[in-house]
Amino acid sequence: MTIATDPQARRPDTVWTEHVTFIDRIPRSIAMAGIMIAFLAVWQLVHISGLVSPIILPGPWETGEDIVFVAKNLASGGYMLGALWITVKEVIYGFAIALAIGFTLGVLVGEFTFGERAVLPYLVAIDTMPKVAFAPIFLAWLGFGISSKVALAAFIATFPIVVGTAAGLHAADENARALFRTMGASRWQTLFKMKLPLGMPQMFTGLKIAAVGVMAGAITGEFLGGGKGFGELIRVAASQLNTPRVFSLIIFLSLLGLALFWTVVWLERRLVFWQRSGAGKFG
Amino acid sequence: MTAGSQSRPVYELSGVAKSYARGNLRALDRVDLTLREGSFSSVIGPSGCGKSTLLKVMAGLIPPSEGGVYLEGTPVTGTREDIGMMFQQATLFPWRTVLENIVLPIEIRDGKAAARAKHRDALALLELVGLKGFEGRWPHELSGGMAQRAAICRMLVTEPAVLLLDEPFSALDELSRDFMNMELQRICMERNATAFLITHSIPEAVILSDTVYVMSPRPGTFVETVEIDLPRPRTLDMMTDAKFGDYVRRIRARLDKGAFL
């Protein structure tokens, strides 16, 4: 081996690039738009092929037209806006009640041995039940008004919040607990200054699941119990075989669901600011 | 840190034992220990030898089954604010700034106003550990070594009579660990702190300590006490001294004999 002393005789660079597959180099916006276009194209193809009756599956164009119609009705303060407002109220009330009950039960079950021993088994038992099946009971108890829908929405959304809160309270590690004990902290100090803040990521996971469940509860309640919300509009449109209307109402409902979900994610980012991964795959 | 056997005893354990009823497990057996003011002692032993049980008993986190634990002449029957503790993890709380983390023990004990009044002391502590200017930072902005420095401040802010250190730097890389150990020595010397360290690094125990207790498991008890007669302040260079090597060999031989059966 000879060592080159002449600076002119420097070895050639070995700069090289890592290979990235073409498909992984597509930017997100273009990739997402591509998937949407492909979906609409397949939909349109199925529609014009005549394989499926247009009553069962309307074309994307008709659906699009109906979406515009519904949007105009909502924007002009038509009857649909009133219906949407009723559903929004059900969702917000349901979520607020689920939050209050879920958080209280979560602390009871997660913080107190008594709660874990005596209350948790019953909560687990109720949680395994198909909660939608309780809808007729809420209807019988609370009538055809908004409250039976709120109750079902809250009922469904409570359990993820209980589980999230209880799991969050168990998140504190041995050291954090020992540290608070050596500092002479009381139970409430330990709870409010350490366990609850440390458990916020888990609590928000529960809240996000609850945000999805509360929508399902409100709409299911409306399906079964009349009322005047968005679910009722869907039910009526479906009974009239107005499938484009069903689709466009679902689109607007999902916007409502997204708004609730993103409110929770926004709150999480504000409160759990130290954990950037908090929003998970949605971030 | 001129740990003469003349200085005042701060912490005393006599005949401390800890049994767990389930399985008749005797985790600790007849441990006698005296920590003198300004001394640095270490206990070394393999995993599961009862080191952590001993530390928990000393911290008042769990009661002993037999024997007496005295700090400053009064019995330890529960956690006390004149005991400072540090763990392998810094355990800083991420929603509090470095400064707010450091005054947390004061806030817990005396409330928010008292904690605010301690800010000046906390800033002085930050300067002592070399974290000047970091008071407004968040824990996730600190490296592992910096986080442990902040944890040292939090431990010192209540001016505890004894420091219990549970492998405080073992999660750090080797280079940071050596450096932090020297920093720990400097801080302890400046504050004339009485410190008790749990470790399973023999060189770490020797370089830091005035006394090293070798512990063997089942039941956990001290099988040898090694007085380390090296001048203070210790330096990392001393680790290549023949005398240092002799201490390390002596402790390792004692550990090999009984500890890993």
Image (cartoon, coloured by chain):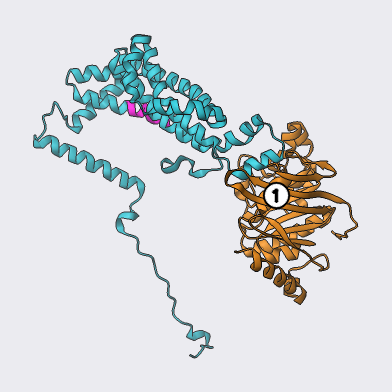
Chain colours: A cyan, B orange
Q: Which chain carries label 1?
A: B
Residue at figure coordinates x 22%, y 38% from the top left = A40
Tell me which secondary structure the magenta stretch mostly adopts.
helix
> Which residue reaches farthest right?
B6
> Which residue reaches farthest front?
B24
Q: Position of residue B185 (x, y in %)?
A: 77, 59
> Which residue reaches farthest left?
A50
* Residue picked out by circle 1: B55
Count of numbered marks: 1
- For the magenta stretch, what is the residue range? A253-263
Residue at figure coordinates x 62%, y 58% from the top left = B172
Name the quadrant of the C terminus of chain A.
Answer: top left
Front residue (pair A209, B141): A209
Left or right: residue A119 compared with residue A67: right
Residue B154 visible somewhere in the drawing = no
Q: Does the magenta stretch include residue A257?
A: yes
Which element is circle 1 on? helix
Residue at figure coordinates x 48%, y 86% from the top left = A9
Which quadrant would residue A138 be assigned to in this image? top left
Q: What residue type is labelled 1?
A: Leu
Q: How crowded is mark 1: few (under 14 residues within 10 Å), some or many (20 or more)?
A: many
Q: Position of residue A107 (x, y in %)?
A: 54, 28
Q: Where is residue B31 in the image (x, y as percent from the top left)?
A: 74, 53
Whether A266 is drawn above or below A249: the answer is: below
